[in-house]
Image (spheres, rainbow, N blue to C red):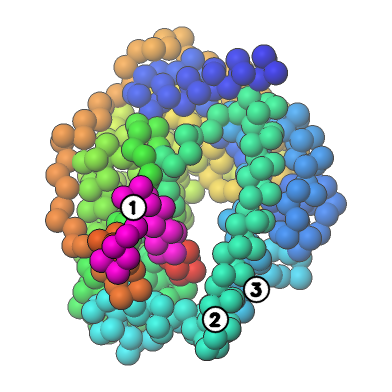
Amino acid sequence: MEDAVKLREERQQLFCDVYDNKIPKRVPVNVGLSLNVVAGYAGISGKEALWHPEKLEKAADELCSMVFSDVCVYSGTILLPAKYQTLGANNMKVSNTGFMQHPNHVGFYPEDYDAFIENPYDCIIERVLPRNFKELDTPGRCMFAAAQAMTASNAVMGESMKLIRKLSEKYGYYSAEPGTGTGVYAPLDILTDTLRSLSGMSLDIRRMPQKVKAAVEAVYPLNYKVGLPQKVTNYGHAFFPLHLATFLKEKDFAELWWKPWLRQVTDYASMGYHSNGFCEHNWMRYLDYLMELPVDTQLQFEQGDPAVIKEKLGRRFILTGLFPLGILRTCTRQECIDKTKEFLDIMMPHGKFIFGFDKSALVYDDINLDNLIAVCETVRDYGVYSNPGEKAGEEFHKEDYVHSEVGAFESKYYKTWEQYLEENPNTPESAKDMITRLEDDIVKFVYGLCQ
């Protein structure tokens, strides 16, 4: 246990150094394996593991003992049939192999734009969710289905998080302070995924760009609210999976996608809260845009030229990703080691770098375990700096960023503390945090159903 405590302190220092703009002792290793990958290693059906993640404990423990990482090797999942099936989801299904998949289902129709622009949250509740979830389109039953979905998903997620905490304590893994991180979408992305879909939004941008622009502006207070953490620290992040950007013409990208997202990360930066964008697909044509982001935004890349990305962005931003997961299956062990060293030679200089793969493995067959072990150990042993503690690059100062005027989040389905108190005047002030948290939990639950 003493060794685990010491390891955790060392790993905490590694990540804190990166976030504090210092050269760390060595490159932090951020490698995790999802629930489906660990289930494959364990020989357990993904369909079973999605409902009972506690059954993966033995396999997850074995993988933690073999694969070196500074974060928990078992990373779990947020896509749970306990939530989606209970609600009768049309927009998320479990495959025969036990993998959660998105059908190309649309819950938001072109004729819904005016209602959405008037109040996005009301429109989502009244129009979108009943189309996406059959149980929410059944009077009376919808109340019980929503309660069951929240209870069931919290229970299953609780088991998964319990396992992660247990493994983290045993192996001394780094983890961010609870309440300091969030997950949220870029404003246009939340309109795209299971609301309009990629194909639907592509049509709308061509046929009704002004409606799309107005909808993005209207959804901003909701999107902004969901991305706020309970506590702002220099080590917490709002995580954005960036979906639609690379499928757009540059004119549409700049006006409809980029400006709203830049606004959001800048608003957060003005509070001292950092953002973490997963640049899915290939962002090489957008590197100049990325330079406009606040200092110390973390950027994970799926594709691109590591040398160019490091040269252009490496002094300003914290970089991760890019190392190809595919080589674990296509290369020999020695080739994996050699490619890892070549990659580190490019990405290590001047710090601001966390090692991670270009994408997460979806199933166990996506990796060769021996090669994964070799890559992670090579990063640990080769990725050592000769100048730890020195300044890494540009310094972040929240005073450099101006917060925009964000309209109040209002909805007939959301009750502020003041409204609650007006209806219930004998409620003590001490209940404010609880009432507010319960209301906000519902907002986040509804928002999550749009992903």
Quadrant position of residue 258: bottom left
**Number of marks in picture:** 3
Magenta span: predominant SS is helix
Q: Which one is closest to the eye, mark 2 or mark 3? A: 2
Residue type of the residue flagged with mark 2: Cys
Region rendered in magenta: 422-443
Residue receiving disc 2: 142
Specify which label sits upstream in the sequence, 1 or 3.
Answer: 3
Residue 47 horizontal/vertical position (percent) = 76, 63
Specify which label sits upstream in the sequence, 1 or 2.
Answer: 2
Neighbor class of circle 3 (other Cα within 10 Å; few <14, some 14-19, many 20+) is: some
Tag on residue 296? Answer: none
Alpha carbon separation for disc pair 1 and 3: 39 Å
Q: Which residue shows up at 34% across the image and 68% down it?
A: 414
Residue receiving disc 1: 428
Alpha carbon separation for disc pair 2 and 3: 13 Å
Direction front: furthest residue: 426
Neighbor class of circle 1 (other Cα within 10 Å; few <14, some 14-19, many 20+) is: few
Q: Which one is closest to the eye, mark 1 or mark 3? A: 1
Q: Which residue shows up at 32% across the image and 60% down it?
A: 426
Residue type of the residue flagged with mark 1: Pro
Quadrant position of residue 422: bottom left
Viewer-proximal residue among 441 and 32:
441
Residue 19 horizontal/vertical position (percent) = 38, 28
Residue receiving disc 3: 85
Decide if residue 151 is in sight here: yes
Q: Secondary structure at mark 1?
A: loop
